[in-house]
Image (cartoon, rainbow, N blue to C red):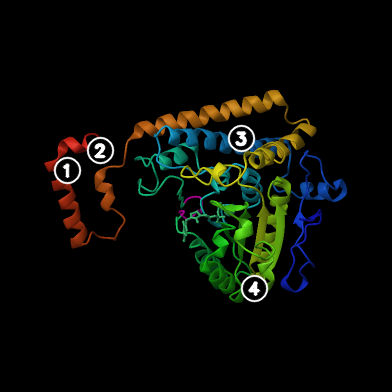
Amino acid sequence: MPLTTELRVYDHDETPPGTWPVFRVMDEDGSLRDPSVGQSYIDSHSPTLDEAHAIKMFRTMARLSQMDHIFLNAQRQGRISFYMSSQGEEAVHIGSSSALTLQDTIFAQYRETGVLMWRGFTMDQFADQCFSNKGDLGKGRQMPVHYGSRALNWHTISSPLTTQLPQAAGAAMAMKLKAKREGKDSSDGVAVCYFGDGAASEGDFHAAMNFASTLETPVIFFCRNNGFAISTPVRDQYRGDGIVSRAKGYGMYGIRVDGNDLFAVHAATAKAKEIALRENRPVLLETMSYRVGHHSTSDDSTRYRSTDEIKKWTEEDNPIDRFQRYCEGKGWLDDKMVAQIMDEERMQVLQALEKAEKKGPPELSTLFDDIYKEKTPELIRQEEALLEHIAKYPEKYQGGGH
Ligand SMILES: Cc1ncc(C[n+]2csc(CCOP(=O)(O)OP(=O)(O)O)c2C)c(N)n1
Ligand SMILES: [Mg+2]
């Protein structure tokens, strides 16, 4: 795909001829592709891209990568039931989330762990959710990686694909109406809806795009195009120019970004947010990256792609390495510091995992909470039946958290 160093969010009536270009600030070796414009994007980075902020972003990507490695192994060892890693998409997560605030409402798919991490979800919270233990905010009722956090303005992940898109359009509309009621020109934040290239084939995609556009809502539809939907490569997913080209048909803004370039993702997300807020219009943003890891712990991706291809993306175009090289060039990081950060983050993850494993499941009585405001007669009968059953077969339920 053609590359461009110009950050331009195209409106529907001015789309680029031919293939949409990919916006890039920083090349694979960490140098600025066009220093004269590249520097201006870095200078407008908010908060200021000083050493402390750069190291914080690097450290968060390092933590995500260590967490993926350790949790994946924990699943292989039978300690958790399932896991999904973000390998190859770390810059998509940190580049975008660092351009947002807690006032922005997030609807994610499932492979956006770094976004939640940047917003402040702690390692203990991640580990508690994956172990479905009594510390889990969702009371142990979801599959691993289906995180939720009201405090961080993050809607709980739901497994059925694309359900979050119409919800995000609706949430953005609510935000706009609330601002209007309060006499403000724009809402305090936008809705940001992350989804995959595969999810974009669902019917809900169309419903969401069209509602968001015609109702004029402040939402960023953030497509992570990582080349695959489980084993289905994008060549079998669509025949148009990726996902962003659809913006024209919906009458909305669009921009395509190099997902392995943290600076480009950050600048494009900030710009998309600015437009969505100012004009109350949706923006379709597509990041181009590669899913380096397996789809999930239920998948073996070597059955449908070559190990050479995976190796190439791991070694030659790795988003963490790219940002690391930039930081090394500035004198902010060296091999020793990188090794130390990786080590510290590995220890944090291991400690959280060990702690979470010991906590045990939520109290059985919590199973019947939050379903209705007050327990219905059916629910009360079910609870009694369950307790009776457990009383009858106590040996089967030793240490079952009650
Ligand atoms: C409605 C629905 N259909 C099928 C699935 C099974 N499924 C889970 S993930 C997935 C692939 C999604 O790919 P993509 O949207 O590109 O996201 P990625 O995994 O690449 O991050 C599929 C088909 C599902 N969860 N929901
Ligand atoms: Mg995908």
Dot 2 crowding, Cα within 10 Å, few <14, some 14–19, many 20+: few
* Among the 4 quarters of the image, the one containing residue 374: bottom left
Whether 57 is drawn above or below 331: the answer is: below
Whichever of labels 1 and 2 marks the residue nearer the N terminus, that label is 1
Q: Are marks 1 and 4 in contact (CB under 8 Å)?
A: no
Across and down, in percent, residue 183 comes to 59, 71
Whichever of labels 2 and 4 marks the residue nearer the N terminus, that label is 4
Whether 343 is drawn above or below 258: the answer is: above
The residue at which mark 2 appears reads as 400
Residues at marks 1 and 4, CA–CA distance in whole angstroms: 55 Å
* Closest to the observer, 274 or 85: 85
| Residue 390, numbered label | 1
The residue at which mark 4 appears reads as 250
Residues at marks 4 and 3, CA–CA distance in whole angstroms: 38 Å
Residues at marks 3 and 2, CA–CA distance in whole angstroms: 35 Å
The residue at the point 68 percent across, 26 percent down is 337
Left/right placement of residue 149 relative to residue 64 reads left
Across and down, in percent, residue 16 comes to 78, 66
Circle 4: residue type: Tyr
Identity of the residue furthest to the right in this view: 36
The residue at the point 74 percent across, 63 percent down is 9
Helix, strand or loop at label 1? It is helix
Whether 349 is drawn above or below 98: the answer is: above
Whichever of labels 3 and 2 marks the residue nearer the N terminus, that label is 3
Q: Are marks 4 and 3 in contact (CB under 8 Å)?
A: no
User: Is residue 154 covered in magenta?
Assistant: yes
Whichever of labels 1 and 4 marks the residue nearer the N terminus, that label is 4
| Residue 62, numbered label | 3
